[in-house]
Image (tube, grey):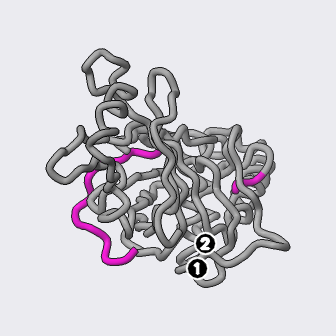
Amino acid sequence: MRTQLTAVALTLFVAACGGGSEPPAGTAGPAGSPPEAAAPAAGAAPGAPSAGGVAAPGAGSTPTPGMAGRTTAELLNPDNETMVFLYYDLTGNAPPVDSWVEKDNRVNFAPAIEKAALRQQVRAEIEAGLAAVRGAGLIRLSVQNANLSDYDPTYGEFTVRAIAPSSEVTFSAFGQQVAIRFANGRTAQIWKVPAAEAQAIRDKITGGTGYFGNVEIELLLGIRSVQPGPGGGTIITDVLEYELRESRTGTTITRMKLAGA
């Protein structure tokens, strides 16, 4: 299972573990108000991306600033289930594993004689996914639309609106919704560019067509805190690094490492 992460108007929601009809993973959009602060298991575990993964915590991992006990282990383009697992790991609340097992379509629709074995299989997958996110302090996301503004000559900047304080990326699985928001979005969204360089950047983005096309963004986020809520909650992060790419050609537009990251 895997989020496309899309790389922030992201739309991608995946089905809950083992089936169902959850919306696609990683949908970015405006949130109600700015935040006040700022891997998945191997095999078929519901939280384990099939083509991504996690650099598991272990010897040599170091604490991530702002979140005591977290490490430099990265979740790589985590899918919906992985983000729900991470949310429970951050809150310290016990996940409702029994309920998740019973609601899994493989168990729910199986003949009675097969249910016991399938329960064990699904439980093992979920527990592996929960173990894989334990202690991870970094999230790497690829988002389809950076929602990049055109150049503002008055302020000498572009604005990466996908990482604005009012933006969020949402994940849905197991009947839970988890959002990622950006504590340092107010400054992270501002990309200062000298006026003399702005036209060359615009040409790279438009491909000489004059059309200000779609720009993808890859983010490295540091987990800062968690805000529990009914039916899910919000993971507050700091944007540490990002890369912008023109979506049609994959041309790199800029790589940015934020001050203090």
Residue 95 on image: x %, y %: 59, 69
Residues in magenta, as a range: 26-41
Q: Which residue is mark 1?
A: 92
The quadrant of the rendering that contains the N terminus is top right
Which residue in the protein does label 2 denote?
89
- Look at the numbered discs 1 and 2 and tell me whether their residues touch, using CB distance below 8 Å: yes
Q: CA distance from mark 1 to mark 2?
A: 5 Å
Residue found at the far right of this picture: 59
Q: Is residue 251 left or right of residue 168?
A: right
Mark 2 crowd level (few <14, some 14–19, many ≥20, 10 Å Cα) = some
Question: Label 2's element?
Answer: helix
Badge 1 local density, few (<14 within 10 Å), some, or many (20+)? Answer: few
Q: Identify the residue shown where x is 64% and y is 56%.
A: 75
Instruction: Name the residue located 63 percent from the left edge and 64 percent from the top edge.
Output: 97
Q: Is residue 98 magenta?
A: no
Secondary structure of the residue carrying numbered label 1: loop
Q: Nearer the viewer, residue 133 or 92?
A: 133
Snapshot quadrant of residue 144: top left
| Residue 29, magenta (yes or no) | yes
Q: Position of residue 161 (x, y in %)?
A: 29, 49
Front-most of 131 and 71? 71
Three-letter residue code for mark 1: Gly
